[in-house]
Amino acid sequence: MIRARLIPLAALSVLSACEPSSRQELPFVPDYQGVETRLLDGDLVSFLVEMRGARDTGDVEDYANCVAAQYALIRGYGFARHVRTNVAQEGGLWRGDAVYTISAALPRGLKTIDAEVVALACAENGIPMV
């Protein structure tokens, strides 16, 4: 009985060695499909982003962060705070519905964005903004 269990586990470990171990190893050819911006209330903004070729939800979230950073800068603010992001994928099209607050001063919270720093990183990584 022990032998029967070890063989499948050994085979599984050999197969898993062939799988990419991180998202950086996955092929990434993004096709950014655009963004829709909605002002919800004062400093609360929603961004609806769409893309193809995402490796996972992280790529969609990165796109939304870039859009939020640029939006904050366009409005004369230096910071944004991530409130939430909902991501869905259907037929290869990834959609993200992300909500942020924008502000002139560093907001409270753990998921804050320095708009200038993030916008620069997005430009360096070829991620489009507003």
Image (cartoon, helix red, strand yellow):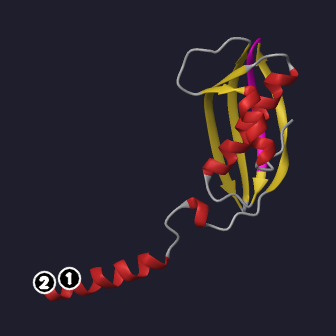
Please name the residue shown 77% across and 53% down the image: 51
Question: Whole-percent x and y of residue 6?
Answer: 21, 83
Instruction: Label 2, secondary structure: give it.
Output: helix
List the residue tagged with mark 1: 5
Please name the residue shown 28% across and 79% down the image: 9
Which of the pair 26/7 is nearer the observer?
A: 26
Amino acid on which the number 2 mark rests in the picture? Ile
Total number of numbered discs in the rendering = 2
47 in magenta: yes
Q: Is residue 126 left or right of residue 83?
A: right
Q: Are marks 1 and 2 in contact (CB under 8 Å)?
A: yes
Question: Whole-percent x and y of residue 129?
Answer: 83, 39
Identify the mark at residue 118; answer none if there is no mark: none
Q: Is residue 106 left or right of residue 71?
A: left
Instruction: Label 1, secondary structure: give it.
Output: helix
Which corner quadrant holds the C terminus? top right
Please name the residue shown 25% across and 87% down the image: 7
Location of residue 72 (image quadrant): top right
Report crowding for label 1: few under 14, some 14 to 19, many 20 or more residues within 10 A (C-alpha). few
Majority secondary structure in the magenta region = strand
Is 88 located above or below residue 22 in the figure?
above
Question: Whole-percent x and y of residue 78?
Answer: 75, 19
Amino acid on which the number 1 mark rests in the picture? Arg
List the residue tagged with mark 2: 2
Q: Is residue 31 left or right of residue 95?
A: right
Question: Whole-percent x and y of residue 100?
Answer: 68, 25
For marks 1 and 2, give the CA distance. 5 Å
**Range shown magenta:** 42-50
Which of the pair 3/41 is nearer the observer?
A: 3
